[in-house]
Image (tube, rainbow, N blue to C red):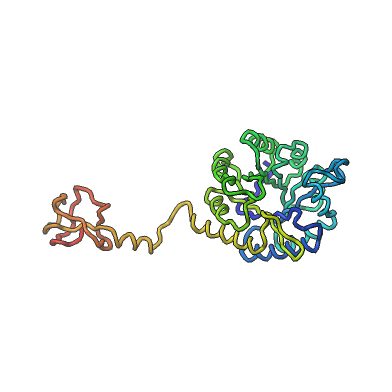
């Protein structure tokens, strides 16, 4: 392993194409989401997507393609200099930077720009030429597993392990938006069991007003959380799986509530809880007058509430207790 990166409690904000090909609009998204991240004091990561469209798209599909993605990629195209402006704005907001490359040339640009992390999209998790190039970057990697059966998740994990890459694994459902019945959050349990040394995350595409999935994901052990982000304007309408800054605020607050509800792995009782239990606990009391040195039998005592501080409780009863003092009827042991 080249190095051990701390993937715990990362919040990934995927800009994707929601910049709409406008640097100004992208800067506005970064500014607003950055304010939310600072408000909550989280480890925020802004994620870009790089495609070198001149070579990424087949020549016959650069015009009039029936592939639904290609027109959007072309219409929202930004150059490296424009992405650099957005990159610098993310750093200016105190957030980390991540990028999803969809071709080998993009990895080189990611390296030259100085990104903190690389994200592998679900559609690229079996793209071996791309993964080989990513493994050479020596950057921390997060791998999404949308649509992959266990055998293929094993193969990509083994691939990066054998190359000494530092990586985390994201449970992901590549349905946009993801309906509740397709979230399959039990997959987080399976991934944690299968890859116990890896940090497991939840890359989410459910409707942005749904807050239960992040809470359940955290409770199941997910420690990286990813959402698409954007800002609506008079002319720009967000897709159904991207969150506004206000919805991200609610999303992070829901995560914080889940953290509070789950608490520590090793629970410590509070004074309030102990007092509450003691108020209902039964103590041990003398049924008859008893003498110092006497061995107490069940017939000598009875159990009743309220429990008196420092007396023996019913849970501490055992035959053979020897008295160290005389006791009158109804006095506590």
- Give the vertical position of 45 relative to 164 (above or below): below
- Asked which quadrant contains residue 29, the reply is bottom right
Residue 6 visible (yes or no):
no
Seen at 67% across and 61% down, the residue is 244
Residue 249 visible (yes or no):
yes
Q: In front here: 14 or 276?
A: 14
Residue 171, horizontal then vertical, whole percent: 62, 45
Residue 125, horizontal then vertical, whole percent: 70, 40
Q: In front here: 82 or 114?
A: 82
Residue 134, horizontal then vertical, whole percent: 75, 42
- Give the vertical position of 28 relative to 152 (above or below): below
Horizontal side of residue 301 vs 191, given as left or right: left
Horizontal side of residue 53 vs 225, given as left or right: right
- Give the vertical position of 29 relative to 109 (above or below): below
Number of disc labels: 0
- Asked which quadrant contains residue 3, the reply is top right
Horizontal side of residue 126 vs 188, given as left or right: right
Residue 291, horizontal then vertical, whole percent: 12, 57
Q: In front here: 115 or 47?
A: 47
- Asked which quadrant contains residue 170, the reply is top right
Q: Quadrant of the N terminus?
A: top right
Q: Quadrant of the C terminus?
A: bottom left
């Amino acid at each position: 392993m080249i190095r051990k990166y701390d993937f715990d409690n990362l919040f990934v904000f995927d800009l994707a194409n929601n910049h709409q090909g406008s640097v100004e609009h992208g800067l506005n998204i970064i500014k607003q989401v950055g304010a939310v991240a600072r408000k909550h004091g989280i480890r925020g990561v802004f994620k870009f997507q790089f495609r070198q469209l001149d070579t990424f798209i087949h020549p016959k599909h650069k015009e009039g393609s029936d592939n639904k993605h290609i027109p959007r990629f072309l219409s929202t195209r930004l150059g490296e200099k424009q992405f650099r402006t957005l990159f610098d704005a993310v750093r200016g907001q105190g957030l980390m930077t991540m990028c999803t490359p969809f071709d080998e040339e993009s990895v080189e640009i990611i390296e030259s720009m100085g990104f903190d992390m690389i994200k592998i999209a679900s559609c690229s998790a079996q793209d071996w030429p791309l993964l080989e190039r990513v493994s050479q970057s020596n950057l921390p990697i997060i791998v999404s597993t949308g649509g992959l059966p266990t055998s293929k998740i094993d193969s990509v994990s083994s691939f990066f392990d054998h190359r000494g890459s530092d990586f985390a694994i994201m449970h992901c459902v590549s349905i946009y938006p993801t309906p509740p019945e397709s979230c399959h959050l039990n997959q987080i349990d399976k991934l944690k069991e299968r890859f116990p040394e890896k940090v497991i995350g939840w890359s989410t595409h459910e409707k942005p007003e749904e807050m239960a999935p992040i809470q359940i994901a955290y409770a199941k052990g997910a420690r990286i959380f990813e959402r698409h982000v954007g800002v609506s304007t008079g002319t720009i309408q967000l897709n159904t799986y991207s969150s506004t800054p206000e919805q991200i605020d609610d999303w992070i607050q829901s995560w914080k509530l889940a953290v509070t509800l789950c608490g520590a792995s090793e629970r410590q009782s509070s004074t309030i809880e102990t007092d509450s239990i003691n108020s209902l606990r039964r103590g041990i009391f003398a049924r008859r007058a008893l003498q110092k040195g006497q061995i107490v039998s069940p017939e000598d005592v009875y159990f009743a509430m309220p429990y008196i501080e420092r007396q023996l409780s019913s849970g501490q009863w055992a035959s053979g207790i020897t008295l160290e003092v005389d006791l009158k009827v109804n006095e506590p042991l």
